[in-house]
C-alpha cells in the first residue's frame, strides 16, 4: 500500500514523503485495512522496529484533520516520551486545518501544566495521565484519540496497574475515544483487544529478518538451520560473539545480567575492537572520551567508561548518570561505538538496535525471591527484538550463550510462546491506591459501582467476581479505618486526607505512615535525619541499597550523632545504604566520595535525590494537613538541600540561578555567605573567584537582582 493512496490530507502525505516514507509495511497496511483512518480502535501486536510509530502518526493525521479534540500519546518511560516529543514536534509544520501544537509532561504529579490545555497532541507518561484524571482536568472530555505505546507492560508488577486504570477510565469516557494500542508480540493479544473493544492487528513481519540461536562450546546453532563456529579466546564467549559481528561490519549489543558484568564484558572487548577501528573513528572516539571526562566528576566508573570509549566499546546501566548515558547512546547510534554491553534495562528504554544481540546469561537476580531466576520468554523476545538495524543491516541475529543445554534453551526461548499478560490490578497496594482514586473522582459512589468499575478492568476480565469483591472489601476496610474515606449510608466519599493522598500520588499506606510519624513529633528540635529515614524507608523510595557488612559501623555512628533528630528510636539494622547516601549528599559529599565510600554511582544518586525531593514534598503537604505548620520551613529547607546537595549554610546562595553546590561552597569560603554579601562584592572581584569568570559573574549579578527585587 503506497503512502500517496492513503485517505489523508495532501499536506500529511507530502510530509510523510519528505520523511522518506513511500510504502506501508505489512503491519501498517493491516492497521489501515482494519479502520485506523476511520476512527476504529485497534490493537497492533507486532515485533520491535516494525513501524508502529508511523501507525500512531497516521491515526493522528486522520483524527486531527477531521476533529477539534485532543490526541493523547501514552509512554511508559520519560526517556521514550522525550524521544517521541522530539519526533512529533516536526508535525507542527503540517497544515491540517487545525494547527498542530505538541505538548509534553512527564514529571510533577501535583500540578497540571497550562501547556497541556493549549496543546492538541499531548505526550504523557502513564503516571502523568493518571494524575491528570485524578485532578479532574476539564480537557479530558476533549480526548478523541488515545495511543498507548508498549501496552504489553500492563502485565508489569509496578507500572502495569496504573496503565490498566487509565485505559479503563479512558475507554469508559462518554466521548468514546479511538484507542490505538501498540504492543510487542504477546500470546493473549486477543484477550487484551477484547478488553479494550479493539480490532486485533497481529503481524510477525519485521523490516530486518531475525534469526535466533544458541551458542555452546564455541558452536552456534541458529533456528534457520545454520551452524557456525566462533573463535574461542580468553575473552569469553559473549565477547567473542560480539567481536565476530563487528569484524563482519556490524555492531553488537551484549546483554549482561549485572552492572559489574556489563563493565567487565566491555573491558574484555576493548583491545581487540580498537584494532578494528578506522583512523576517523578513533579521532571521534577520542573527542567523546574527553567530553565524558570534562562533563563529569572523575569517579572510577566515569574514568573506566572514558578509557573504553576511546577503544570503540562502552557499557550502559542505571548507575551511569543521564549525561553519560546520552553520550553513549548517541555514539552507538552514530556507529562509532561498535560494541555496547548493557544491563537489560536498555531493552525497555530507548531504541538502540544492533546487527547482533548477545544474551550472555538468561538468569536475573530477583529481589523479592532473593536469588537468580531465568528471565521470561517475553523479556527474551524484547531483548532479541533489538537485533537488526533498519537501513543498515540485511539481517539481525540474536544468540543466547548456553552451557550444555542448547535444545532446552532453543525449545523454551526461541520456539516458545511469550507468557500471557496477566493483570496486577488486584494486588493489595494497587487496589487500595486505585480504589481511593476512584472514590476521589466519583464522590458518593456505592460499593456495587466500585465493583462494577473494577470488573471493567483487565483484572476484572481475568478474575472471578467473588475474588475481586473480597479484595475490594479488604481495601475499603483499610481506607475507612485509616480515615482516608468515609461512608454515609451506602455511599463512599474521600476525606480531605484521602483527597490529599490521591493528589500527592502516593500509596495510602505511605500517607498514613507519614501522618502518624509527624503528628506527635517534638516542636523544639530539628528532625532532618529522621525525615530522611522516614522517606528512604517507605515503599515508593527507589533505588534502595541494603547495608554491606562494612557499612554497619557508619550507620551506627550516624544514628548516634543524629539521635536527637529521629522521629522514633532506630538501630543500624533499620538503615539502608540509600539513607547513608542521602545524608552524605546533603552534607556535600562529592560523587567521587559517594562512589568510593558507599559504591553509590551518580545515576543512582540522582534518582534517589529526585525521589527524596518528591517524597519530602509529600511529607510537607501531609504535615500541613495535620496542622504541623512548625515543620514546614524545615521540610522546605530539606527539599532544597536534597535538590542541590548542600549544607544549611548555603541555602541563601543557591536561590540565585547559576549558583549550585560547587560555586556556593567556593563563594562561602570567600566570605560571601548570603545574598547581602553577594550584592556588596563588585562584579570584577566576583569574576576573579575560581569557577566564576566574567560571564558567569555578570549572569549571577543579573539573577541576583531578580531574586532580591
Image (spheres, rainbow, N blue to C red):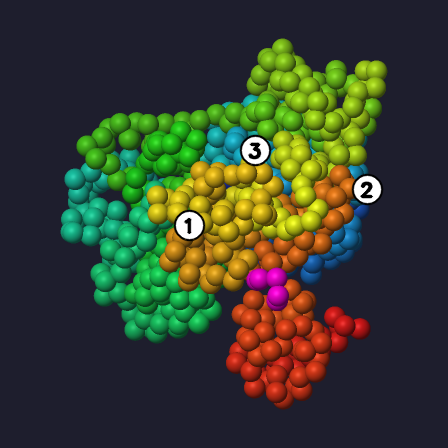
Residue topped by disc 2? 138
The magenta stretch spans which residues?
A: 646-650
Disc tally is: 3
Q: What is the x, y in percent for residue 457?
A: 64, 24
Whole-Å distance between the Cαs marked 2 and 3? 25 Å
Q: Earlier in the sequence, mark 1 or mark 2?
A: 2
Does residue 567 show up magenta in the picture?
no
Report the front residue among 427 and 214: 427
Residue furthest top as drawn:
466
Q: Earlier in the sequence, mark 3 or mark 1?
A: 3
Q: What is the x, y in percent for residue 191?
A: 56, 23
Q: Earlier in the sequence, mark 2 or mark 3?
A: 2
Seen in the picture, residue 449 relative to 403 is either above or below; the reply is above
The residue depicted at 56 percent of the width and 86 percent of the height is 688
Quadrant of the rendered structure where residue 597 is? bottom left
Report the front residue among 667 and 389: 667
Can I make out residue 145 in this image? no
Which label belongs to residue 554?
1
Whole-Å distance between the Cαs marked 1 and 2? 52 Å
The residue depicted at 33 percent of the width and 49 percent of the height is 260
The answer to the question of whether label 2 and label 3 lie on touching residues, with beta carbons closer than 8 A, is no
Q: What is the x, y in percent for residue 642?
A: 59, 56
Q: What is the x, y in percent for residue 366?
A: 40, 34
Report the front residue among 663 and 102: 663
Residue topped by disc 3? 160
For the C terminus, which image quadrant? bottom right
Whole-Å distance between the Cαs marked 3 and 1? 38 Å
Q: Secondary structure at mark 3?
A: helix
Amino acid at each position: 500500500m503506497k503512502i500517496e493512496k492513503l485517505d489523508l490530507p495532501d499536506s500529511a502525505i507530502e510530509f510523510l514523503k519528505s520523511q522518506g516514507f513511500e510504502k506501508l509495511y505489512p503491519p501498517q497496511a493491516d492497521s489501515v485495512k482494519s479502520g485506523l483512518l476511520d476512527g476504529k480502535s485497534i490493537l497492533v501486536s507486532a515485533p520491535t522496529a516494525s513501524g508502529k510509530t508511523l501507525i500512531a502518526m497516521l491515526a493522528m493525521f486522520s483524527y486531527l484533520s477531521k476533529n477539534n479534540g485532543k490526541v493523547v500519546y501514552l509512554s511508559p518511560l520519560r526517556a521514550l516520551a522525550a524521544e517521541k516529543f522530539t519526533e512529533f514536534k516536526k508535525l507542527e509544520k503540517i497544515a491540517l486545518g487545525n494547527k498542530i501544537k505538541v505538548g509534553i509532561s512527564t514529571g510533577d504529579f501535583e500540578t497540571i501544566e497550562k501547556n497541556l490545555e493549549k496543546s492538541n497532541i499531548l505526550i504523557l507518561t502513564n503516571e502523568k495521565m493518571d494524575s491528570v484524571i485524578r485532578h479532574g482536568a476539564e480537557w479530558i472530555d476533549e480526548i478523541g484519540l488515545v495511543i498507548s505505546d508498549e501496552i504489553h507492560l500492563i502485565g508489569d508488577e509496578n507500572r502495569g496497574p496504573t496503565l490498566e486504570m487509565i485505559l479503563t477510565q479512558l475507554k469508559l469516557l462518554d466521548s468514546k475515544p479511538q484507542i490505538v494500542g501498540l504492543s510487542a508480540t504477546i500470546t493473549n493479544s486477543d484477550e487484551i483487544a477484547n478488553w479494550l473493544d479493539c480490532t486485533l492487528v497481529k503481524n510477525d513481519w519485521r523490516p530486518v529478518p531475525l534469526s535466533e540461536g544458541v551458542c555452546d562450546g564455541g558452536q552456534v546453532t541458529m533456528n534457520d538451520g545454520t551452524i557456525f563456529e566462533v573463535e574461542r579466546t580468553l575473552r569469553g564467549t559473549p565477547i567473542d560473539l560480539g567481536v565476530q559481528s563487528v569484524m563482519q561490519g556490524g555492531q553488537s549489543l551484549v546483554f549482561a545480567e549485572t552492572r559489574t558484568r556489563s563493565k567487565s564484558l566491555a573491558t574484555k572487548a576493548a583491545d581487540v575492537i580498537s584494532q578494528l577501528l578506522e583512523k576517523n573513528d578513533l579521532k571521534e572516539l577520542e573527542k567523546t572520551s574527553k567530553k565524558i571526562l570534562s562533563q563529569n566528576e572523575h569517579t572510577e566508573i566515569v574514568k573506566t567508561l572514558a578509557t573504553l570509549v576511546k577503544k570503540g566499546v562502552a557499557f550502559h546501566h542505571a548507575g551511569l548518570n543521564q549525561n553519560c548515558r546520552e553520550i553513549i547512546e548517541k555514539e552507538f547510534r552514530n556507529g562509532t561505538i561498535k560494541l555496547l554491553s548493557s544491563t537489560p534495562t536498555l531493552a525497555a528504554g530507548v531504541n538502540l538496535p544492533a546487527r547482533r544481540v548477545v544474551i550472555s546469561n538468561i538468569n536475573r537476580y530477583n529481589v523479592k525471591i532473593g536469588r537468580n531466576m531465568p528471565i521470561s520468554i517475553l523479556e527474551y523476545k524484547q531483548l532479541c527484538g533489538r537485533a537488526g538495524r533498519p537501513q543498515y543491516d540485511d539481517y539481525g541475529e540474536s544468540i543466547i550463550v548456553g552451557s550444555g543445554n542448547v535444545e532446552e534453551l532453543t525449545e523454551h526461548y526461541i520456539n516458545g510462546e511469550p507468557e500471557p499478560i496477566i493483570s496486577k490490578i488486584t494486588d493489595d497496594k494497587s487496589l487500595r491506591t486505585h480504589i481511593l482514586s476512584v472514590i476521589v473522582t466519583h464522590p458518593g459512589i456505592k460499593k456495587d459501582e466500585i465493583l462494577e468499575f473494577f470488573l471493567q478492568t483487565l483484572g476484572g476480565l481475568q478474575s472471578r467476581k467473588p475474588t475481586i469483591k473480597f479484595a475490594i472489601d479488604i481495601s475499603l476496610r483499610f481506607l475507612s479505618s485509616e480515615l482516608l474515606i468515609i461512608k454515609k449510608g451506602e455511599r463512599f466519599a474521600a476525606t480531605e486526607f484521602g483527597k490529599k493522598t490521591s493528589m500527592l500520588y502516593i500509596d495510602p499506606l505511605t500517607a498514613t505512615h507519614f501522618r502518624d510519624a509527624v503528628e506527635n513529633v517534638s516542636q523544639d528540635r530539628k528532625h532532618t535525619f529522621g525525615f530522611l529515614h522516614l522517606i528512604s524507608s517507605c515503599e515508593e523510595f527507589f533505588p534502595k541499597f541494603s547495608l554491606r557488612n562494612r557499612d554497619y559501623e557508619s550507620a551506627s555512628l550516624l544514628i548516634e550523632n543524629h539521635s536527637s533528630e529521629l522521629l522514633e528510636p532506630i538501630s543500624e539494622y533499620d538503615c539502608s545504604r540509600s539513607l547513608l547516601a542521602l545524608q552524605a549528599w546533603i552534607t556535600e559529599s562529592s560523587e567521587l566520595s559517594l562512589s568510593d565510600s558507599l559504591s553509590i554511582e551518580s545515576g543512582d544518586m540522582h534518582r534517589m535525590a529526585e525521589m527524596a525531593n518528591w517524597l519530602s514534598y509529600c511529607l510537607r503537604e501531609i504535615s500541613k494537613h495535620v496542622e504541623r505548620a512548625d515543620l514546614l520551613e524545615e521540610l522546605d529547607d530539606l527539599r532544597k538541600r536534597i535538590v542541590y546537595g548542600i549544607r544549611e549554610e548555603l541555602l541563601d546562595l543557591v536561590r540565585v540561578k547559576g549558583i549550585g553546590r560547587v560555586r556556593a561552597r567556593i563563594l562561602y569560603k570567600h566570605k560571601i555567605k548570603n545574598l547581602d554579601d553577594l550584592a556588596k562584592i563588585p562584579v570584577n572581584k566576583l569574576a576573579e573567584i575560581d569557577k566564576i569568570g566574567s560571564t558567569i559573574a555578570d549572569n549571577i549579578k543579573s539573577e541576583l537582582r531578580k531574586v532580591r527585587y
